[in-house]
Image (spheres, grey):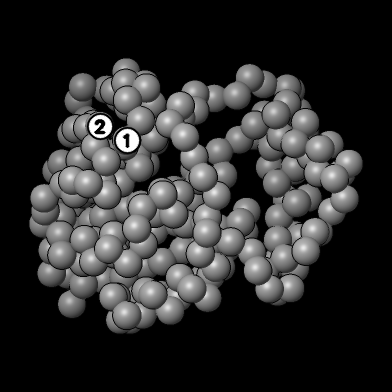
Amino acid sequence: MKILPPRVLRALERFNAAYPWDHNAHYHRWILRQLPRRFDCALDIGSGSGDLARLMARRAAAVTAVDSDPGITTQAQKLTPASLPVTFTVTDAAAEFPNGPYDVITCVATIHHLPFAQTLASFRRHLAPGGTLVIVGLSRAQTPVDYLLGIPAIPANAAMGWLKNKGRPSPRPVSMTAPTRPADMTFDDIVRETRKVLPGARLRRRLFWRYTLVWRRP
């Protein structure tokens, strides 16, 4: 099912290339609102350029930030002041999950690259009692409702790009060099699998083709 004809989609792609902005960073402040004011250890899976890890480091005693992309991890290290308690590591979380326990675990636009149920189980295992897990993920649109929910994001995406760049075309920010792939699970699939592994988790569809998941370990 197509929302827009190919010609319009190509025009939007050109607009987004001229006025780029980070859809994931849009949710960073929301993520912080889900977390305690102060906590000891945090883990950020898929840390990218380190923006979220640096924000959490202002509340945490230590933040471990892992990403599978060496290039973006190097950039993250360069952008991070030595005064912040962040350790950046190149790690494939699917093969070697960083040992916890952690008071906070975050994962933004990354879990669709990992085996979903196994990764949730790893999060549960390495989250400290009373700890908080926050995921911002991508799902595959399947139903008419999914596509209809994506429609408001189209003009909002263009408006945000224009505002973030103050109406001036800008070069794209530093991006990952590792291969990416689209999400293959629908939102209903995600909800069903999450309920099995993390009972009581809160999931919600979000703007800009994202969903959120919040779980607090008893």
Which residue: 51% across, 45% down? 181
Q: Is residue 25 left or right of residue 163?
A: left
Q: Which quadrant holds the N terminus?
A: bottom right
Residue 154: in sight, yes or no?
A: yes
Disc 1 residue type (three-letter):
Ser
Left or right: 185 in relation to 104: right
Vertical placement of residue 200 versus 210, above or below: below
State the mark number for residue 90. 2
Q: Residue at x 15, y 55 (%)?
A: 102
Measuring from the top left, give residue 144's x and y in whole percent: 74, 73
Where, by quadrant of the figure, is residue 177 drawn? top left
Identity of the residue drawn at 36% across and 80% down: 195
Counting from the top left corner in percent of width and height, residue 91 is at 24, 37
Say if 125 sits above or below 74 in the image.
below
Q: Quadrant of the C terminus?
A: bottom left
Disc 1 and disc 2 in contact, CB within 8 angstroms: yes
Q: Residues within 10 Å of mark 1 (few under 14, many from 20)?
A: many
Where does label 1 land, which residue? 68
